[in-house]
Image (cartoon, rainbow, N blue to C red):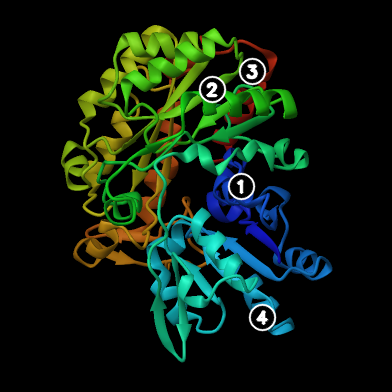
């Protein structure tokens, strides 16, 4: 049994628009790397990161047929889903024998629609966590077990949808191995964060936990956390994290890591334990992480900085407490502002994300968001236009708050295009607010001062000059 797991290519100009393409992000597809890591001693499973290689559908199809794969799996987000469909349709036309399967966050949120919209295209849709599910599927396709033994899949049989029992989820994530052991060296040099959001290359991403207890209505994680994951956060051991960092550093020369956990700092004592371990083992590597605003204090931030952390990323989303309450963000603008002040005081760079055009947004709340993004200590605010995501609480509420103009899963959907128009607003206003936000926030002397203290190298200077050229095009 020979299988390939594909991360489809989404052109950066599609996601960010031509103007903002330079601030694109290309990070490792950790989901399918975990699958390959877990199954590497059981099956021949390859990873094709077409997104990093910028391989168009025709290139991917050529690779698949040249290598005679029995099973082709796609890991998709809402943005990459239509590109996976295009590839799958062409493969299906050329070869009826190849098994086509699909998973990832979009499939988890909308697996029933995938089967109903494209009957006969995908043989199986993974609706939950992938490691045990893919193992059971490959066991079935290899003839080792019967179809009744499948776990974690949905499929059509005689026109009827069948959903199997969910695959179990182990408490100990360490058993899935190390993504750093299976990634190709050729890929590592292709990964990077946004301009100003990284210091050094090569860089890589690491996830140390799965699950998030917060209930943000625009995010698909709560649905999975509440149903599939039994409301539990599961962790890698601190020893595993250190081993992964050492593998990345020694094998690939990685100099910076971004921890992509939904909430890296959820358990304060674990953060302190990790920082102590990385200092004791003398693992010299720069890192950033996703951070929840109300779980922080000066002591923790100081310890993180000492252990190599140079930046944290907070999802502020809105400058309106009314909107934050509506979307169940679980934080207030005051808490976000306080973290900015604390991070600035200890010399940690603060990245802050905002979403324009959320359900419930008005001109007043959007102008509050732009104004809030100018807060002292916010070193790198960045903005995106709201994308309606299936499998989220907000998606089901949208008819009450406005109308979708870009269908979910279409190639028009992007963070720089208007996909949803809240009641009382227009597409023109939302686009203007999105573009204006960058100019108003960055073209200020205070912002210049914010950044000057973080310029430590010629590379940093080049990043800032590139950012200025980007602003000039808006």
Of pointers 1 and 2, the one earlier in the residue sequence: 1
Q: Secondary structure at mark 1?
A: helix
Residue 461: give its label.
3
* Distance between the alpha carbons at the discs numbered 4 and 2: 42 Å
Q: CA distance from mark 1 to mark 3?
A: 34 Å
Residue at x 44% of width, y 14% of height: 304
Residue marked by disc 4 = 92
| Mark 2 element type | strand
Query: In the structure shown, which secondary structural element does the residue marked by tag 4 occupy?
Result: helix
Left or right, 161 with respect to 400, comes to: right
3D distance between C-alphas at marks 2 and 3: 19 Å
Residue 189, image x, y percentages: 73, 35
Up-down relation of residue 152 to residue 184 (above or below): below
Q: Earlier in the sequence, mark 4 or mark 2?
A: 4
Quick check: marks 2 and 3 in contact, CB under 8 Å?
A: no
To which quarter of the image does residue 394 belong? bottom left
Whole-percent x, y for residue 301 in the image: 38, 13
Asked whether residue 247 appears in the rendered view, the answer is yes
Q: What whole-number distance in Å separates the C-alpha atoms at marks 3 and 4? A: 49 Å
**Residue drawn at (59%, 63%), measured in percent from left and top?**
74
**Residue shown at the point (57%, 46%) measured from the top left:** 34
Mark 1 surroundings: few (<14), some (14-19) or many (≥20) residues within 10 A: many
Q: Are marks 4 and 2 in contact (CB under 8 Å)?
A: no
């Amino acid at each position: 049994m020979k299988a390939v797991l594909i991360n489809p290519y989404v052109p950066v100009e599609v996601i960010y628009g031509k103007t903002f393409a330079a601030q694109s992000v290309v990070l490792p597809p950790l989901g399918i790397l975990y699958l390959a890591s877990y199954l590497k001693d059981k099956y021949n499973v390859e990873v094709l990161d077409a997104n990093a290689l910028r391989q168009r559908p025709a290139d991917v199809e050529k690779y698949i047929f040249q290598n005679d794969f029995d099973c082709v799996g796609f890991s998709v987000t809402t943005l990459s889903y239509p590109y996976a469909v295009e590839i799958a349709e062409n493969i299906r036309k050329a070869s009826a024998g190849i098994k086509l399967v699909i998973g990832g966050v979009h499939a988890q949120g909308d697996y029933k629609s995938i089967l109903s919209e494209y009957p006969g295209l995908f043989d199986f849709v993974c609706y939950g966590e992938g490691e045990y599910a893919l193992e059971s599927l490959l066991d079935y396709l290899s003839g080792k077990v019967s179809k009744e033994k499948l776990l974690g899949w949905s499929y059509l049989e005689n026109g009827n949808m069948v959903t199997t029992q969910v695959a179990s989820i182990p408490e100990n994530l360490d058993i899935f191995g190390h993504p750093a052991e299976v990634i190709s060296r050729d890929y590592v040099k292709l990964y990077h964060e946004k301009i100003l959001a990284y210091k050094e290359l090569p860089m890589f991403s690491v996830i140390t936990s799965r699950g998030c207890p917060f209930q943000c209505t625009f995010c698909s994680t709560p649905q999975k956390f509440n149903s599939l994951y039994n409301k539990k956060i599961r962790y890698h051991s601190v020893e595993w994290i250190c081993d992964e960092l050492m593998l990345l550093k020694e094998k690939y020369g990685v100099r910076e890591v971004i921890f992509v956990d939904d909430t890296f700092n959820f358990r304060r004592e674990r953060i302190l334990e990790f920082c102590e371990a990385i200092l004791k083992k003398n693992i010299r590597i720069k890192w950033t992480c996703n951070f929840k605003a109300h779980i922080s204090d000066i002591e923790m931030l100081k310890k993180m900085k000492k252990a190599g952390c140079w930046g944290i990323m907070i999802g502020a989303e809105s400058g309106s407490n009314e909107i934050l309450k509506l979307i169940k963000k679980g934080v207030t603008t005051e808490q976000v502002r306080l973290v900015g002040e604390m991070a600035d005081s200890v010399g940690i760079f603060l990245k802050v994300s905002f979403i324009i055009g959320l359900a419930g947004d008005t001109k007043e709340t959007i102008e509050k968001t732009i104004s809030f993004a100018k807060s002292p200590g916010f070193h790198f605010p960045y903005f995106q236009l709201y994308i309606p995501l299936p499998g989220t609480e907000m998606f089901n509420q949208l008819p009450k708050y406005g109308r979708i103009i870009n269908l979910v899963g279409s190639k028009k959907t992007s963070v720089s295009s208007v996909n949803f128009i809240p009641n009382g607003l227009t597409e023109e206003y939302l686009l203007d607010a999105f573009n204006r936000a960058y100019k108003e926030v960055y073209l200020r002397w205070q912002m210049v001062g914010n950044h000057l203290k973080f310029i430590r190298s010629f590379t940093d200077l080049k990043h800032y000059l590139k950012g200025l050229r980007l602003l000039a095009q808006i």
